Image (cartoon, grey):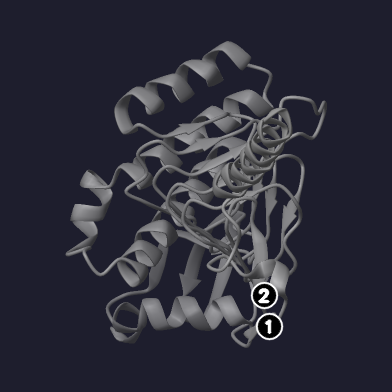
Amino acid sequence: MYPVSYKSEWNRVLRLCFADEIGNPRVSSVNGDFFIFSAKGTCMKFKYKFDSESSRFHIIAKLDRPAEMALCRAVREIRDDIDVIMARDPAAVSRAEVLFLYSGLHARIMHRLSHALNERGMKFGARAVSQFAKFLTGIEIHPGATIGRRLVIDHGMGIVIGETAEIGDNCTIYQGVTLGGTGKDVGKRHPTLGNNVMVGAGAKVLGPLKVGDNSKIAANAVVLHEVPENSTAVGIPAKVVRRDGVKISNEQLDHVHIPDPVAVEFARMRNTIDELRAEVAELKAKQK
């Protein structure tokens, strides 16, 4: 056994968890399991035993089988997903509602499974899970996509996330969003979203570009070029209109007072017709 001193952090945690049992003079020892979660989401499971005479916890065994650790990590991430949905979605009534009725959460849970299968070379099984998730939720996430923690998929119907897409932590994606390719790239061909990125309903982010941290993509925008950090992009094609909270003053970014290309073409044709009419009238006058 490997003794853990009372001064260690986890020794204190365990003493707090079992304060009532330890304080009972009839209890000579406390046995059980505990988990340690790292900041990256990995976990380790230990068996412990408390000896009341020495006031020490003793680590009996460390259980770190990959499957066990992966399950611990998945449970922790799902709990985080539920918490962040409760925090960001004012329509969420309870955690039970989020767990059983939110299609965005279901899509994320099934993507974790499909991604794990894909990483282990089980391509057919991974795509089968992905297609089942698409049938069930209306959200298509390729098994190869890399997704960070605490992603919120609001409503979700019609979302498509491509194979080489990467999504950072604490992002929010609304219905109808496409993180796709342009059809001509090979290798890395889908976009990368940084941390704390919001992509509005119906927006299309196309190609192997990067959207910086803390940026926002407006609804129905079509992003074809990289978006810097702390920026807001709107329009078709998308232009950055705010950066670090400051409006960018540029006539090229005016999305209201812009020429109508159809109207411009009609005006050009009308001018040409007027010129031809004038020439015809002049020729007729000469013939007389």
Q: Residue at x 62, y 54 (%)?
A: 42
Q: From where the camera sits, is residue 72 visible?
A: yes
Q: From where the camera sits, is residue 52 visible?
A: no
Label 1 Cα crowd, 10 Å radius (few <14 / some 14-19 / many 20+)? few
185 relative position to 107: left or right:
right
122 lies above or below 64 = above
152 lies above or below 50 = above
What x and y, as percent, mark residue 86?
30, 67
Label 2 Cα crowd, 10 Å radius (few <14 / some 14-19 / many 20+)? some
Amino acid type indicated by mark 1? Asp
Residue position for label 1 = 244
205 relative position to 30: left or right:
right
71 relative position to 286: left or right:
left
What x and y, as percent, mark residue 44?
60, 55
Mark 2 and mark 1: span between their CA atoms?
5 Å
Task: Tell me the quarter of the picture where residue 52 sits.
Answer: bottom left
Between residue 270 and residue 197, name the one nearer to us.
270
Q: Residue at x 63, y 67 (%)?
A: 39
Tell whether label 1 touches label 2 (CB within 8 Å): yes
10 lies above or below 85 = below
Q: Residue at x 71, y 64 (%)?
A: 212
Taking the view exactly as shown, the residue that stands out farthest to the front is 288
Between residue 100 and residue 209, name the one nearer to us.
209
Residue position for label 2 = 230
What x and y, as percent, mark residue 228?
75, 67
What x and y, as percent, mark residue 213?
68, 68
Query: In which quadrant is the N terminus drawn?
Result: bottom right
Amino acid type indicated by mark 2? Asn
Give whichever of discs 2 and 1 has the lower sequence position: 2
